[in-house]
Structures are given as structure tokens and as C-alpha cells.
Image (tube, rainbow, N blue to C red):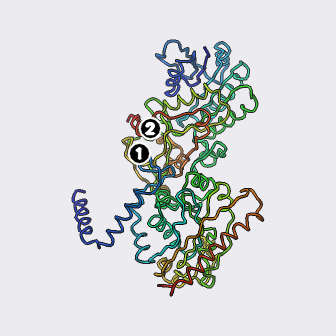
Amino acid sequence: MEKVLITGIAGGQGRLLARRLLENYEVCGADWVPWEGHPRGVSVHAVDLRKKKFEDVVRTEMPTSVVHMAFIRHFRGDPRRRHDVNVRGTKQLLDHCANYGVQKLVVVSSSYVYGAFPENPFYMDEDHPLSASRSYPEIRDLVEVDTLAQGFIWKYPHIRTCVLRPVNVLGYFVHSAIGSYLRMERIPTMMGFDPMMQFIHEEDVCEAIALALEHGLQGVFNVTGPGQVPLHTAIRETGGKALSLPEPVVRPLFQRMFNWGLWPFPPGAIDYLKYPVTLSGRNFIEATRFRPLFGLEEIFHSVRR
Amino acid sequence: MGLLSGIGRIGRDLAGAVLPLQLRDIERELDDRLRKIPAQLNEFGYDEFGLSPDWIRRSILPSALLYRLYFRVETFGIEHVPAGRVLLVANHAGQLPFDAAMLNIACLLEADPPRIARGMAEYWVPQLPWVNVAATRSGQMVGTPENCVALLEAEACVAVFPEGVRGMNKLYRDRYELMRFGLGFMRLAIETQTPIVPVGIVGSEEQQPGFANLEGLGRALGMPALPITLGFPWLGPLGLLPMPVKYRMHFGAPMEFGGSPHDEDGSIEPKVEQVKHAIKELLDRGRAERRGVFR
């Protein structure tokens, strides 16, 4: 049986993926924090990806496949530490994959790396430039991670490396930026803006990762769900209350509140509430025949408030 | 709140009773036509590009009244608009894009099946609050080549005005003179193998006669142009509103072009000239038929 190593296994998406892959693979995982009550047969190592101990994990576990999704996505801590964990952690992981005979690698990036801009075409394919750091410098580490992984494809063509960029992920377990935004008491939106947004269910993200492993995909792929709706429809359908605010007032205000730790998102995130970041998932569908199981209504119902 | 909504409801009922029959006929017709547009909607009523027929239904009445009662638009040859992908190429004039709005209504009310003419908006439109939502819901998109190709591949009807602002702000003495055409639309038509239907719009060129265009000053003020017309700037923004000219829209036979979309300008230009010539002929026909600017 093939053995797969999941980094970030203790996160919501990681736990789901571990259970999903357990049917067909021997599963082990690494995470910053331990996973209490993990299923039997899964070995979980509480390590820092940047440390020597993680290299020992890869050396002793000898996985044939690796799924990388150990990223800090929130902005609560020191931004320098976040950058180091995400970028250097990824770099270390890539080195270990090259050195210890890993055959397949899936790196889970996101749709945010494209950036939200007024001139965005409605469906961006994988060749579209990753410009997020132009207006949202706080997530440049995620852009760098994506770019590192792309470079790895060229350097080690014998390793089947695949970068997945799923759209906004929602579900019971996953911790996503869009999920914590939609679970707010009063959800701030920008007055006069209502961009179209794509969503995908967490189980379908697991399915997409499993398909990428199964097919040994190589390359960069957008992963899209069942469709798109305006932001306000998503807020209504997940049972939230929108609070429409004028952007010229909100932007400086959110900057201050973010600096003081009273607000979880940097002001660059505001652009994602104004302009569409809609991806074309055509290439992934053609390569894997992927079809999302969960429809939009089910996705919205899965958001627990 | 209860009181307010109660008053609102009474107001609506009264309006419904007083509303002239003609108005209600137009509303019913619009409903009927909107039901027949070939759009694939998701369970929340949006198509893949953010268009919402429901939103159009609620906001289209003023334009439809302009179409029927103010400009009294007549269309000729609209059966040339095919059911699948098509690029409508028309002349552009009149300081404000009423010609684009009337072309949209014509495609909705007169074409068979009814079509939503998708417009390609300027790059700054998505940055305007409310305007961006209205544009998306009614089927307009930012005019990037990617968007145009995506629309045509989804078998949409896309309306373009290759004269751009050069046409919109043309002077009265240049009326029915076609300004320089951009070449982009032809490359996109060739790339997606889309038939081009030329459209000659008679009327808009006289709706707001311009005598000068102080482009430099306008740009300094952050506007795409600064026209001096019969009404503007003397009467303020209201001075840009059009006079009740009569619109005549002539649709020509579909034109198909081969070749490569990546050819040099020199081989694209003659094809664009053919389209320009077709529009010119349609305009001449429309002007010959009419008895006056307002009739």
C-alpha cells in the first residue's frame, strides 16, 4: 500500500483528508500541534516543518506521496514568523521530498494568490499572473509558497508535483478566511459592491486532492466547485446579516483596528469584497473528470454559526 | 416599519390601478421576453457571469419606456441576429450611451429568441459603487479580451462599438461619419469564429449635437471628454440628456471572416474596413428612409 504524508494533518481540512485517504493509503502526518483522538492506523508527529526533527519524520516514514497544507493563514501572530513558517517550511519540505524518494507531491495553494482587482477577467486560468501582493502584501508568503512549488515542478520533473488552487472553501471542519468571515455576528460588506464568489465544499477539496494523487497529476490547477453567487446571497444563505459600510471610511478604520488587534483581517482583504476572483477550473476537470458532489445550497448549509 | 411598509403597499396598489394600460402591456411583454432568453441560471437565479434576469426585470422599465415612447425605435432586419454566438458591431454617438441601451432593448424585445446584448465596459466601471453591481447583473462585463472570448464561447450576443469614446463625443458636423475603428473586435471574432452582424443606428448621432470637445481640459478634470453641446455645460448634467429624436436601427447580414487572429494589423484592417463599409451602407439606407430627425 502506498504511504502518504500529510502536513497540517491536525487542521480541519487535514483531518478530513486523513480520513478520506485512509481507505486507499497508509497515512501519516505532521503538524505543529498534536491531533488528539486521531484514527487508529494514522501516525501523527507533532513537529515544526522547519526543524531537523521533521526531516527525521520523512526519513523514517518514507512516504511515497506528500500532501502539503501546513500553512498559517490567520494574521494573529507576528507577521515575520508567519512568513518564515509558510515559506521556509515549504522550502524544507520540498528539499526532503527531493532527497528521500517521494514520488508524488500535492501542494494546496488557494485562489487568493491571483489577487482581487477591477480588471480581473471573469474566469482566470492558471496562467494568470499571481498579483495578490500588489494590494494585499500580508499574503505574499502564500504567493511565494505557490511559486516555490511551481519551481519544484521544473527542477524535479520525475516527481509528480501538483499545485492546487481551490476557490473559497466552506464546511463544518475547515478553518478558512471566508468561513470565519461568514460566521461573524455582523458581516461587513462594502457599500455598492457585491462581487460574484465561487465556493467549494471541504469534502470536495479532499476529493480533488485524492484525484490529483490518484492520477499523479503534474502542473498547476485551479479547483472550482459547483458555481458562484454574489457575496450578499452567500451571506443570506449562510444565515448571516450583512452590514453595508462605505469603503472610504472603512479602509482606514480597519487598518487601525487591525493594528490594535481588534479586527482579524488586514485592509488588503477589502478588495476581495469588491472585485471578483473567479477561476476557470476547466483544466482540472479535463485532467481528472472531477465533479463536485456538494451543490451551492449544501455548501451554505454546512456553515455552522 | 409596519406603518411605512403598509403605506408602501397602498401606494403600489394605487399605482397599479392608475398605471396606464400601455405601461402594463410593456411590463407584461418584458416579463414574457425575459423568460425566453437563452441563459443557464443556477439555483439562485444567476448565470455564470453574474447576470440576473430578475434584476433586469426590476430595473428595465425606464429604458423600455424610452425605447417605445421617447425614441420610438424601429428596427429593420433584426432576424439577421442568429441564435448562437454573435458580435453586434454598431456606430456610437450622442455624448451619453443611449444608443447602447436602445440596442440592448431592441435585442430583448424584437430579436427571436430574445437576446441579452452583452456590453464590454470600460476598465473603471468596476470601481464605481452601485454602478458595478448594476453592470454585472444586467450582463455587462469589463472589456478584457478574456471576457469577450469567454462570453462568445458561451454562445452569447456581444455588442461592441469600435469607435469607442471617439465616436461617443463626435461633433455634430461629423454626424454619420464613422471614426477610426479599433481592430480588437475583429481579432476576437476570428479567434472564436463568431459571425459579425453590422448595425447602423440612425438617430443617436443627432440626439445631443456637440460643437467642440475640450479633451485636454476634460482629462485634467478626470473625465474621458468634455463636450460642448447645445445643452452642456450650460444646463449642467441635465444638458447632456438627449432630444427626442427618432431611432432607426438597421441590422445587416452576418459577415464571417477567416484567417488568423494573430495576423499583423495590415491584414486585419481590410476586414475591419468591410464591416465599417457595411455599417455605412446601413446608415445611408436609414437616413434615406426617414422624413426628418424627429419623425
Reading the image, the residue beneath label 2 is A295
The residue sitting at 66% across, 17% down in the picture is A58
Reading the image, the residue beneath label 1 is B43
The local crowd at label 1, few if under 14, some if 14 to 19, many if 20 or more residues have their Cα within 10 Å, is few
Chain label for disc 2: A
Chain label for disc 1: B
Quarter holding residue A187: top left
The residue sitting at 55% across, 70% down in the picture is B251
Q: Position of residue A297 (x, y in %)?
A: 40, 39
Q: Are marks 2 and 1 in contact (CB under 8 Å)?
A: yes
Do the residues marked 2 and 1 share a common chain? Answer: no
The local crowd at label 2, few if under 14, some if 14 to 19, many if 20 or more residues have their Cα within 10 Å, is some
Q: Position of residue A300 (x, y in %)?
A: 41, 38
Q: Amino acid at mark 2?
A: Gly
- Up/down of A157 relative to A24, above or below: below
The residue sitting at 66% across, 58% down in the picture is B188
- In front: A282, or A9? A282
